[in-house]
Image (cartoon, rainbow, N blue to C red):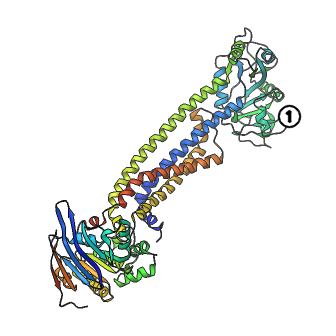
Amino acid sequence: MSLLEIKNVSKIYGELKALDNVSIHVDQGEWVAIMGPSGSGKSTMMNIIGCMDKPTMGEVLLDGVDIAKESSKRLTDIRRDKIGLIFQQFHMVNYLTAVENVMVSQYYHSMPDEEEALEALGRVGLRERARHLPSQLSGGEQQRVCVARALINHPELILADEPTGNLDEANENIVLDLFRQLHREGTTLIVVTHDPEVADAAQRTIVLEHGKLVKEVINEHFEA
Amino acid sequence: MSAAGLPFKNLTRKPGRTWALVLLTAFLSLSLFAGSVVVMSLQSGLRSLEARLGADIIVVPAAAKTKTDFQNILLQGTTGAFYMDAGLLDQIAAAEGVEKAAPQTFLATLKADCCSSRLQVIGIDQQADFTVQPWIAQSSSRELGPLEVAVGSDISAGVGDTLRIYRQSCPVVARLSPTGTGLDTAVYCSMETMKTLLEAAEEMGVSHKVTSDNAEEVISAVYVKVAEGASVDQVATSLMSHPRWKVAVVQTRSMITDVSDGLAGVASAVKVLIGAVWALSFVILLVVFALLTNERKREFAVLRLIGASRRSLRRLILTETGLVCLLGGCLGIAVGAAVIFLFTALIESALGLPYLTPDGGKIALVAVLSLLGTALMGALASARTAWHLSRVDTGSILREGN
């Protein structure tokens, strides 16, 4: 069953076609990697799927809803309810502790629950660091807090943009193991990456170039 | 974590920035509160002066400094005395255009063993008086008896205390309500008591004789109420130009106008000062919030990312501003109140104008309005920031540096 269906989507900035008639579908529970060189349209795709931008043309069906036609307010609701976002930079609110950074996501979604937030931190191995401010955490730890924050509201889709780009090997493995665990639990993952090793961890890789989908590769060695 | 929790945490975990904003808003509310209370006190003092003078013309001896001394006694609370023949009272009362005439006699006490402290004693004719007597009647239902005195609100003695005036023991039987004028520092007694005190002073070598006459009895001033239909100017001119009386006249309307002009000048200066402080503070707040816009772009992009609506971000900034303004506003008002009330006497003497602090209800209203004004200023200054930050391009900001 398809969670995300992108049909003939184009995004045009003046003369530039950042996305040119791209069609992709992602099934529920699938793990997809999107690869491509700089300027290939990966970020534009990520913005559109993450409800942070709208396409110029085409349809983007997320769980049956065409998000290309929704209002900005509704897109915020959809992003909050269905999507967990992870970026390369460790975007934490710098005056909140690790657990508060997770709870603030609960606050805007439903209701803060400290025990549940601590459990989420425990899941990424940071329960003991829950009361630390971002400035007291390493880069890898901050990224793991961001992962905990992304999954605290049980989103249907985890959308990650270069999630391991700033991590050392040990932290990269921790994050990939977390993704594997989420995948086993049925969460749909879309990971934008430059790193072939990260792409290899996914079930399927989509390659973009100059805004067009040029290749789709099924990972035959994929291990759930 | 709650709706107020996020702004509260931001403020408490950025103490330097928060205190800078709090102090700035405190400065705003202090200037508005203190400035408003000073202006209101001056207006209140002027109204009180008008009520207490009650006469159209005040006749005093024609000596060179008498008019100035008299105004200083009334406005500044300085001590002084000047005398003229008490026989003039009947002649003034009989003059054309005069409806009522009431005498007052002044006596300045000494800062010596004979007296409790340096005081201005004013004797009134309790039957004829129409200016001080109604004021005394607000505090005491009976007339002042022999040696009994009523004291102005700035005199430290209270009812039941006894003042020593030229070795005479004078029991305090009434304490008068404040007027914000020099009258608050005076002691009031009947003409009979004043006669006794003048004799006691005479025995101690303090002369109260009219230098050019051999008057048996003396008075210092005659308060005149002009008859209806008569011209105050004409009556004043006629009294002053009498060939044998040698008197000067003070027209209370012109005195009040002088005070009113002085008050208008001070009020304008205070208003300009408040305006300048507010304009400057508004510009500083705008700059500070503009700098914060840049500093907090990423934080707000993160909050948008995790589902905060634009409206909730605007609310977040306005709540933060509200908390800062509330704290700063209260601090400013507290400091303003402390300065205003601790240094009332200093302000009063520096301004040299009648100064009567308004009652608690009015001050509380000014405090609330100052707080609201400060909050409104903060809200206006942060509104632009709130709008900008709520419209951040989440995707591009969070990808910066990737």
**Which structural element holds mark 1?**
loop
Farthest residue toward the top?
Answer: B243
Which residue is under mark 1?
B145
Q: Nearer the viewer, residue B171 or B389?
A: B389
Question: Residue B107: percent from the left, percent from the top?
Answer: 74, 27
Towards the viewer: A188 or A68: A68
Residue A143 visible within the image: yes
Q: Quadrant of residue A73?
A: bottom left
Q: Residue at x 54, y 42 (%)?
A: B35
Q: Report how many numbered discs are placed on residues in the image.
A: 1
- Please say if A8 is above or below B333: below
Residue A164, quarter of the rendered image = bottom left
Disc 1: CA contacts within 10 A as few (<14), some (14-19) or many (>=20): few
- Up/down of A10 relative to B251, above or below: below
Residues B290 and B21: in front is B290
Residue B99 percent across, percent down from the top left: 78, 20
Q: Chain of mark 1?
A: B
Q: Quadrant of residue A61?
A: bottom left
Instruction: Identify the image quadrant of the C terminus of chain B.
Output: bottom left
